[in-house]
Amino acid sequence: MSEDSNKDIFTIGIGGAAGEGVKKVGINIGKLLCDMGFEIYLSIDYPSLIRGGHNFVRLSFSKNKIWNDYAKLDILVCLNEETKEIHKGEMKENAEVISGLALPEIIERIKNILKKRNFELNREKNESELINGNIAFAKGLEAAGLDFYIAYPMTPSTSILHYLASKQTKEGLKVIQPENEIAVINMALGMAYAGKRVAVGSATGGFALMQEAFSFSGMAELPLVVAVVQRQAPATGVPTRSSQSDLRFIIHAGHGEFPRIVIAPGDPEESFKAGAEALNLAWKFKVPVIVLLDKILSEHLMTSSIDSGFISVERNESIIFPGTPEKVVKVTSYEHDENGITVDKAEDVKRMVEKRFAKSANIEEEMKNREAVKIYGNTDGGDVVVFFGSTKGSVLEAAKYFNKSVKLVQVVWLEPFDTERVKRELEGKRVICIEGNHNGQLASLIREKTGIEITEKILRYDSTSFDSIELAEQINQKFS
Amino acid sequence: MATKSKITWCPGCPNSQILVSFRQVVTELVQNGLLKIENMAAFAGIGCHGKISDYINVNSFTSLHGRMIPAMTGAKCANPSLTVVGFSGDGDSYDEGLEHLIHAAKRNSDINLFVHDNRVFALTTGQFNALSPKGFKSKSTPFGSIEEPFNSLFLMLSAGATFVARTYAGDMAGTKKIMQAAITHKGFSYVDIIQPCITFFDTRDYFKDKVYWIGEDFPTNDLKVAMEKISENAEDLPAQAGKVPLGIFYKVDKPTFEEELYK
């Protein structure tokens, strides 16, 4: 099946120079379609500059759930002349071009085209909202009682900072932007020490700067949530493009050994849940919790159902803070005894390492009650596709074009790792691992944990997302 | 105020005098009803000075090297009723964590910083640091340091600190007075405590003759006057002549970061 023959899906592209409002036009069209009851996936592609360059929004929609955008366009909206030239190869046969119009006229034209083509829905306004992973994650933090968000701007994590900054109140949530990422995380640890629920966020490069203090949170058992958004690396890399190449770095982050939790959501709904879960788990276990995102998940919008009503704020009454009469609260980055006094005797050191790791069994038990691994498609199938993070969207959309039924396995918790479950789902099956990196880091982690070697991999490391049609063809071929 | 921890500073180290001065200041503040002991949060960096948190039986937070200041601001933002003091070293604040020091002064966070100023990295057994004089011979600079030191107080005044003072560890009465004034000042209080390292850079004799207290009538609200005063001995150790003034050079009231945050 080729996408041209999929009459259920309609795709609009909006292009223009940076600063011409491409994103704004795209999101407005998205909201219109959302109000009409469509399911939408909206991708945003832009270079790292303020004015000029070429920005492009691609918006695919359908009456059914849609997990990825499509390359071929039904409508191309040009906010500048160049757009027509750049995207001429992506047009379907009967595609229409809209150019030289302002937003209200563009919207009218789109409505007319949809009517003419009979691509309309006669249903109520969608209850879902059009949201990206960053904002959904931030809403999850809010719902779980976030007191402080501390961050230094870094693409593609910055929209978390902007969103939460706009949600500050006099007595409630506060957002601070300090001098650098090292200040960010150390400030956050001071807040956790004084009893506040705090999260920090950055791209992986910024998180790289936080390593020593991340380790400190493990040593001092200070609850902390860290949002890490991957972009194409190493170093400054390709700031506005995606990657899944930091899995290994993240699960091993910080020097020394200490328990931590790493959750990698795959869509905005999971990001929302991960934000809330991360804050509650950090406080429950007094450990750092990382929510691992990537540019695709962070910035692409999807119709999603976000309901804060289901989130509870779970506090930990066993933690005491400075300001408590008759109590002295001592925290230190040195190895220390139960009273927070520095120790270096071998037996004390060993005892304290074991005290911290005693939490690991409880965290693993907790993991069993959470969606650490998710299964889609044919759960009994002999063929399996495994993936993590935003690749979920590309794979679930590709699954619409599979020739045979395939079991889809999403690893959500990367640390701790649900070895038993993953082993059960993969053992004795033909498995393809799909990842946005060069080294097949998830495949290597699965081998490390389960002993299962995955030889079939589809890896993408050109900083862009998987095209679901291409992906389906590759998977069909490998499983033929 | 003491803990069961054994003091491991070199016998005779002026750090002990800073410790005793601080304990007495806290005791007096509590006795006079100016402080609830549970609201004292004492921070420390990494270096010889940092051991102090093990020796005081109050809430404490021993940070990473150079990273104490943002943690102090974090705690103060989280709970403005805390009295946040921090013990740092010149290496901790002027080498590893300089950006945090300058920004805390800039944002006038209501925290109190006591810098144990010995002009050498002591705990790592003696290397030059950002306040060591040019020509200072150490294990890492065997032919003498080739860099000029910072003028630490000048830097703090330029960065926007609203309370800038200097004291001498050996003068405990003077140190107590300055510590108390710093703690009661609303805003970023910077106190330089000259603390000769008796093992790696023994400046006791040098300072003994050169330190003097500026008068009670010194105008503390004039930045220009303050800058002139603290520049008296700008060339610094082991400088030739010149006196080293002690006292409160600058003290002005400005809205604090935490006040602005909750406004």
Image: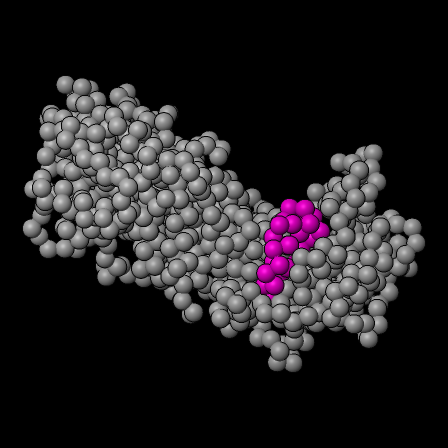
The x and y percentages for residue B173 are 79, 70
Q: Is residue A75 above or below residue A140?
A: above
The residue shown at (28%, 38%) is: A78
Question: Residue reaching furthest front?
Answer: A100
Res. A340 in view: no
Q: Is residue B246 above or below residue A177?
A: below
Q: Is residue A434 left or right of residue A335?
A: left
The x and y percentages for residue B135 are 84, 40
Res. A325 in view: yes
The residue shown at (79%, 44%) is: B148
Residue B210 drawn in magenta: no
- What secondary structure predominates along the stretch shown in magenta? helix
Residue B100 drawn in magenta: yes
Q: Is residue A443 left or right of residue A478?
A: right
Question: Residue reaching furthest bottom?
Answer: B32
Q: Quadrant of residue B212?
A: bottom right
Q: Is residue A61 left or right of residue B242?
A: left
| Colouring rule applied to residues | one colour
Q: Is residue A175 above or below residue A290?
A: below
Question: Residue reaching furthest right?
Answer: B241
In the image shown, does A219 or B78 lie closer to the viewer? B78
Q: How many marks?
A: 0
The residue shown at (38%, 51%) is: A160
In the image shown, does B6 or A113 lie closer to the viewer? A113
The x and y percentages for residue A461 are 36, 27
The residue shown at (11%, 32%) is: A6
| Start-end of magenta stretch | B84-111
